[in-house]
């Protein structure tokens, strides 16, 4: 199949970004309602919609998500009529998280119902950085695109961070709490602890490659992190600032070491940390900026992160 006859529908933002990095933007004929980067794909037809309102408070979103999953309903619907019209040759999805994007099962059901095409499904399953690089390679191989330079570039950026923090002693690695959801409180996991450690921090609460755990408020207080980074799933800087205010209203908040030292930060988790694609290298650089401003200045302040 030549690249001109390839018609790809990407149902996950990280998949769209992987395709774009590999130079396959023109082959994307449809996208999910959350695929917004790079900007030039925003004119592509939208093939999914959410069954919930993401503008309500985070505890309501969480409740709604649980209700849908308990009813054995996906959080997202696929517009099979749009898929039918687009006649894709390939669909990119994921089976890493039912809350992040359309589930693999939903995609398989939708594809089975198509009459004009039988697209190949490529399902991404990233848990750690290495998996993300492997996904990029796999997508490249599927479309006969050489991914070596792309992956070498990403790995080189990681190496630069590692090299620059080599001179630090362990007590210069701050204890870091990454908050992925506010109500209930959850911490960033999978690749997030790995990014924290690579950026010269000590990740609290989460295990590399494992799903995000819930965190008791008391545990946060007792562990008393040096740095707190907010990166709620699906929220930009403004929304993250609003959500973080909820925690800041709690009486014990002011006693936290990170708060007293002015080391609480908000990030655009939607654009960076929650998307297991090429911009995880940017996410690492954002954390490096935050954790060690005396060593790093990548220039993401104001767009990727801000002090809280």
Image (tube, rainbow, N blue to C red):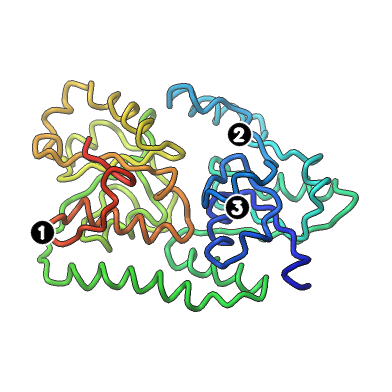
Between circles 2 and 1, the one closer to the viewer is 1
Verify CB contact (< 8 Å) between mark 1 and mark 3: no
Residue 80 or residue 40, whichever sits in front: 40
Secondary structure beneath dot 1 equals helix
Quadrant into which the C terminus falls: top left
Q: Which residue is mark 3?
A: 95
Q: Residues within 10 Å of mark 2 (few under 14, many from 20)?
A: few
Viewed as shown, does residue 249 lie left or right of 72? left
Viewed as shown, does residue 180 lie left or right of 142? left
Q: Measure how far apart labels 3 and 2 are at the Cα level.
A: 15 Å
Q: Is residue 22 above or below residue 7?
A: below
Q: Is residue 298 above or below residue 11?
A: below
Residue 245 picture location, percent across and down: 28, 25
Residue 275 picture location, percent across and down: 47, 51
Q: Which residue is mark 1?
A: 172
Tell me the quarter of the picture where residue 247 sits: top left
Residue 160 or residue 169, whichever sits in front: 160
Q: Which residue is mark 2?
A: 69
- At 35% from the left and 32% from the top, the residue drawn is 238
Residue 130 picture location, percent across and down: 44, 68
The tag earlier along the polypeptide, 3 or 2, is 2
- At 41% from the left and 73% from the top, the residue drawn is 153
Secondary structure beneath dot 2 equals helix
């Amino acid at each position: 199949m030549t690249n001109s006859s390839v018609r790809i529908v990407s149902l996950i933002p990280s998949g769209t970004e992987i395709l774009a990095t590999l130079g396959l933007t023109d082959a994307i004929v449809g996208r999910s309602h959350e695929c917004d980067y790079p900007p030039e794909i925003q004119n592509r037809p939208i093939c999914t919609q959410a069954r919930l309102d993401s503008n309500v408070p985070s505890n309501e979103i969480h409740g709604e998500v649980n209700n849908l999953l308990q009813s054995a309903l996906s959080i997202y619907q696929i517009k099979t009529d749009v898929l039918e019209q687009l006649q894709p040759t390939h669909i990119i999805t994921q089976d890493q998280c039912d809350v992040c994007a359309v589930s693999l099962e939903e995609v398989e059901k939708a594809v089975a119902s198509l009459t004009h095409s039988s697209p190949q499904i490529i399902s991404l399953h990233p848990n750690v950085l290495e998996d993300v690089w492997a996904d990029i390679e796999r997508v490249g191989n599927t479309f006969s695109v050489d991914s070596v330079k792309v992956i070498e570039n990403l790995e080189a950026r990681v190496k630069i961070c590692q090299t620059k923090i080599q001179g630090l002693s362990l007590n210069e690695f701050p204890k870091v709490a990454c908050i992925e959801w506010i109500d209930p409180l959850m911490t960033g996991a999978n690749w997030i602890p790995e990014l924290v450690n690579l950026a010269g921090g000590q990740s609290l609460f989460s295990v590399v490659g494992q799903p995000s755990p819930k965190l008791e408020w008391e545990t946060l207080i007792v562990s008393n992190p040096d740095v707190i980074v907010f990166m709620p799933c699906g929220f930009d800087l403004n929304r993250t600032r609003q959500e973080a205010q909820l925690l800041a209203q709690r009486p014990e908040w002011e006693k936290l070491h990170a708060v007293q030292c002015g080391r609480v930060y908000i990030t655009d988790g939607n654009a960076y940390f929650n998307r297991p694609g090429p911009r995880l290298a940017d996410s690492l650089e954002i954390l490096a900026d935050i954790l060690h401003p005396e060593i790093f200045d990548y220039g993401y302040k104001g767009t990727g992160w801000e002090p809280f």
